[in-house]
Image: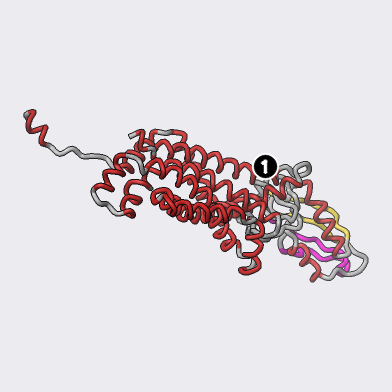
Amino acid sequence: MSGPALATLPVDGRSLWQDARIRLLRNRAAVASLIVLILIALACLIGPALTGHPYDRVYQDHVRTPASLESHPKAEAIPGAVQRIASRIRATASEIAAGRDSVRLTLTAQRPIDQRLLVYFERSDQFGRARVAASEQDGRKLTLEVPIKRLHFWFGTDANGRDLLTRTLVAGRVSLAIGLLATSVALVIGVGYGAAAGYLGGRIDMLMMRIVDVLYSLPFIFFVILLVVFFGRNFVLVFLAVGAIEWLDMARIVRGQTLSIKRQEYVLAAEALGVSTGGILKRHVIPNLLGPVVVYVTLLVPKIILLESFLSFLGLGVQEPMTSWGVLISDGARSIESASWLLVFPAAFLVTALFALNFLGDGLRDALDPRDR
């Protein structure tokens, strides 16, 4: 094909979003962080259904069980558990032979043993329904076959005997949902309000910013307490309100960036061509704010997660038996000397999510910066 013919071929351009996607995929740290966040989100969504433990199930025989890959009860704990149940039946256990899936034992008593009391084995968290293999001495001596309930607690259990793995994953649902919900509210209000104030300028800008200053002066905790009084302890409504307060910083950041952007040549050219204010904000101002806004959003999500833990500690946030990473970390910190796993695992999830959000935010900032085009 000749040179003039090549010159007449149309050139396919790339949009801002296409350029941003290409730059983001080149950033290995950002891509790895995105994958980590997706895996954490999937684990929190699907994991609780696969652990085999309800998040609010209390195992009274497995209180503060350390994290382990082995099944419970362990072989050395079976005789003691059998003796405790036998004492409730008013009998003595002997000839205890524990196998992999069952335990064989002999119960003896001074009077005939009421076989209805054998239900104590089934009611425990370690054994199933006992079967009488032999009865001697007019029922004063019973030979039993009792199945063993094999349970796994990979992250251990808490002070109430609840599986920590399941609770950590369920807590991730709550923490991530709260962070995203409140951040979305702050993002929508803050970007729209700040961009309008910065672009319109003059007395309108001054009035809008004075409203922000007034809202800054309101005590946050008092505002949350008022919401709890009016709406009850509905943490969804509470954190919608949190997002409605956290937009103040977002509005100031966006306003400052908008004051700089509205002096650019492409904005002046759009004004000269008669483009409406809404069109300029939508096509020229807001897209060029995405870099700093995205970075602030990735910092706002962990900030709200930590704020949630503070409110839950005061009794204004997540209530038992529901939980969150902040609540688990607060509980684990009080038991760090005697049960360190209660702090280590929830904190590991939270720290990993925070690091991933920060790296992803840096990658998105670089990808969405129009000066890199």
Tell me if residue 364 is in the magenta stretch: no
Q: Residue at x 62, y 41 (%)?
A: 348
Picture coordinates of residue 265 (x, y %)? 30, 39
Three-letter amino acid code of the residue under disc 1: Val
> For numbered disc 1, what is the local secondary structure?
helix
Total marks in image: 1
Q: Is residue 296 left or right of residue 1?
A: right
Front position in the image: 311 or 155? 311
Q: Residue at x 52, y 39 (%)?
A: 358
Q: Is residue 245 left or right of residue 131?
A: left
Picture coordinates of residue 260 (x, y %)? 40, 40
Looking at the rendering, the stretch of residues picked out in magenta corresponds to 129-149
- Which quadrant holds the N terminus? top left
Tell me if residue 137 is in the magenta stretch: yes
Q: How is the image coloured?
A: secondary structure
Q: Residue furthest top?
A: 3
Q: Is residue 184 left or right of residue 328?
A: left
Picture coordinates of residue 91 (x, y %)? 88, 62
Is residue 290 visible in this depiction of the protein?
A: no
Give the quarter of the image for residue 369. Answer: top left
Q: According to the image, label 1 marks what residue?
A: 344
Front position in the image: 194 or 117? 194
Q: Main secondary structure of the magenta part?
A: strand
Front position in the image: 354 or 201? 201
Picture coordinates of residue 131 (x, y %)? 74, 64
